[in-house]
Image: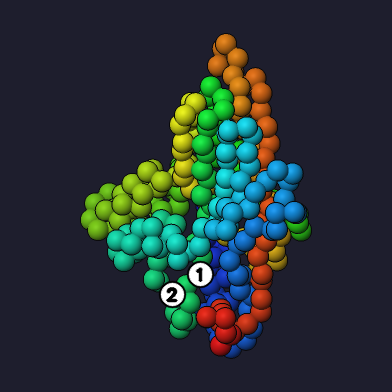
């Protein structure tokens, strides 16, 4: 059973529950936030905007959780048209006044002013929750398969929407490419939605290549960790402006 199929089943079950108000209280997540700086790895800096930054000399690698509101503002036209690949836009489950999250999205940013060439493979990232749940990111092919389900045939409006989504993904996902000295690169890493029982978790970037040998094979690598948390609360509807309906 593919991850995309399992993701569909996950949301089918979640939205079935969400669409039935008679079931009463449900679990809703608050925004993902970094744990305090003193609880991060040694030397890690937590910025005011929620960015968690590792520095190795003049190499900076940081991760920032993205909210759906930020992603909708990042792609306003696509959101209005309903083709923002990172969110459900303004769609809401039947009978509800809230929109669930489609994915868990982080912005990865790298500034290399230290090494001749480095490389970060986004597909070697992983989320490991304190309760043991693990999540790996979607590849561009997996996301293509996910959105292709919404395209009917190879023509018409639905296929056009599919191409618009893929154009955004191809231009904004973090790509595995060498970053030479003096260069910077950023992009998104997309994970499945987190389960309601996940409150504390770590994002790992594994096997970040700092040096290559004469055959262009990795000579020195490092694993980096970024610690995050979120509140998960029980309510009939999500909190709006600090209040629970």
According to the picture, the residue beneath numbered tag 1 turns out to be 100
Q: Is residue 85 visible?
A: yes
Label 1 Cα neighbours within 10 Å, binned few <14 / some 14-19 / many ≥20: many
* Contact, mark 1 vs mark 2 (Cβ under 8 Å): no
Picture quadrant where residue 42 is located: top right
Picture quadrant where residue 89 is located: bottom left
Across and down, in percent, residue 33 comes to: 62, 61
Which residue lies at the image location 66% right of the left edge and 28% below the top edge? 221
Which residue lies at the image location 48% right of the left edge and 77% below the top edge? 98
In this rendering, position of residue 37 left or right of residue 241? right
- The color scheme shown is rainbow
In this rendering, position of residue 147 left or right of residue 55? left
Picture quadrant where residue 232 is located: bottom right
Across and down, in percent, residue 66 comes to: 51, 58
According to the picture, the residue beneath numbered tag 2 turns out to be 92
Across and down, in percent, residue 16 comes to: 54, 75
Say which quadrant the C terminus sits in: bottom right
Q: How many marks?
A: 2
> Label 1's element?
loop
Alpha-carbon span between mark 1 and mark 2: 8 Å
Which residue lies at the image location 53% right of the left edge and 22% below the top edge? 116
Which residue lies at the image location 51% right of the left edge and 62% below the top edge? 67
């Amino acid at each position: 059973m593919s991850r995309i199929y399992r993701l569909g089943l996950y949301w089918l079950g979640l939205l079935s529950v969400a669409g039935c108000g008679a079931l009463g209280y449900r679990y809703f997540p608050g925004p993902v936030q970094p744990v305090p700086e003193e609880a991060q790895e040694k030397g890690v800096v937590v910025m005011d905007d929620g960015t968690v930054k590792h520095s190795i000399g003049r190499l900076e690698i940081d991760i920032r959780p993205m909210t759906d509101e930020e992603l909708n503002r990042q792609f306003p036209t696509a959101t209005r048209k309903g083709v923002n690949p990172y969110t459900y836009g303004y769609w809401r489950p039947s009978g509800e006044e809230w929109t669930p999250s489609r994915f868990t999205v982080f912005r990865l940013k790298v500034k290399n002013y230290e090494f001749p060439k480095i490389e970060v493979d986004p597909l070697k990232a992983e989320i490991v929750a304190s309760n043991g749940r693990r999540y790996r990111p979607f590849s561009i092919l997996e996301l293509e398969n996910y959105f292709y389900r919404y395209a009917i045939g190879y023509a018409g409006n639905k296929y056009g929407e599919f191409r618009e989504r893929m154009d955004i993904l191809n231009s904004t996902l973090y790509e595995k490419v060498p970053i030479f000295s003096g260069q910077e690169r950023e992009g998104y890493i997309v994970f499945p939605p987190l389960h309601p029982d996940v409150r504390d978790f770590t994002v790992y970037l594994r096997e970040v290549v700092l040096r290559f040998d004469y055959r262009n094979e990795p000579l020195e690598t490092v694993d980096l960790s970024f610690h995050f948390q979120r509140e998960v609360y029980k309510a009939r509807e999500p909190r709006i402006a600090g209040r629970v309906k």
